[in-house]
Amino acid sequence: MNPAAQSWMLLAGRLLMAALFIVAGVRKALAFSASAAYMTKNGMPVADVLLVVALIIEIGGGLLLILGWKTRIVATALFVFVVVLTPIFHAYWTFEPPQMVAQLNNFLKNLGIMGGLLYMMVFGAGALSLDEGKPAEPRPA
């Protein structure tokens, strides 16, 4: 594949992944009390504190993906975040059939997100990023 096209596709992938995390974080922030109550209902202790942590991870991680700064580290943190929370909030096997289908879809969506994050962990941000915009190492004389 053409390197320029690859760079633009990696940027598009980062933007699409970032949108998911940023929108989820902003929605939680705008409905802070309801989000904390939902977390409590799902067995999360100190939900207010954990919600603030989730907002930092989702919104901050999403913004860092857009910039392409420390992308491998950010993707790893987001991967761990999704791996830990998926079976807590999308335990489809515990729901009645109508809700089971929706939760299964969310569970599978999260598996896809994990797959995309694994790609970012391996391939990084690409050329159109702050990761690649760093100054070149000095060459030995």
Image: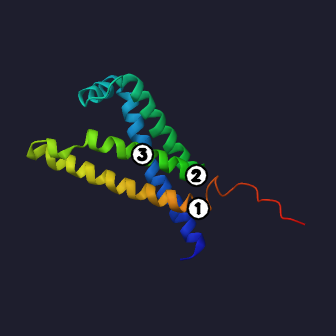
Residue bearing the label numbered 1: 126
Q: x, y percentage for residue 121?
A: 50, 56
Amino acid type assigned to the residue bearing label 3 in the image = Val
Residue bearing the label numbered 3: 80
Q: Residue at x 53, y 43 (%)?
A: 63
Q: Residue at x 42, y 49 (%)?
A: 79
Q: Residues within 10 Å of mark 2 (few under 14, many from 20)?
A: many
Foreground mark, 3 or 1? Answer: 3
Q: Is residue 25 above or below residue 72?
A: above
Asked if marks 1 and 2 touch (Cβ < 8 Å), the reply is yes
Amino acid type assigned to the residue bearing label 1 in the image = Gly
Amino acid type assigned to the residue bearing label 2 in the image = Gly
Residue bearing the label numbered 2: 68
Element under label 1?
loop
Asked if marks 2 and 3 touch (Cβ < 8 Å), the reply is no
Q: Which mark is residue 55?
A: none
From mark 1 to mark 2, how far is it between C-alphas?
A: 8 Å
Element under label 2?
loop
Q: Is residue 36 above or below residue 97?
A: above
Q: In the rendered structure, which disc, 1 or 2, sits on the residue that comes first in sequence?
A: 2
Q: x, y percentage for residue 54?
A: 42, 34
- Give the camera-side residue of 15 and 48: 48
Q: Is residue 139 above or below residue 110?
A: below
Q: Residues within 10 Å of mark 3 (few under 14, many from 20)?
A: few
Q: x, y percentage for residue 24?
A: 38, 40
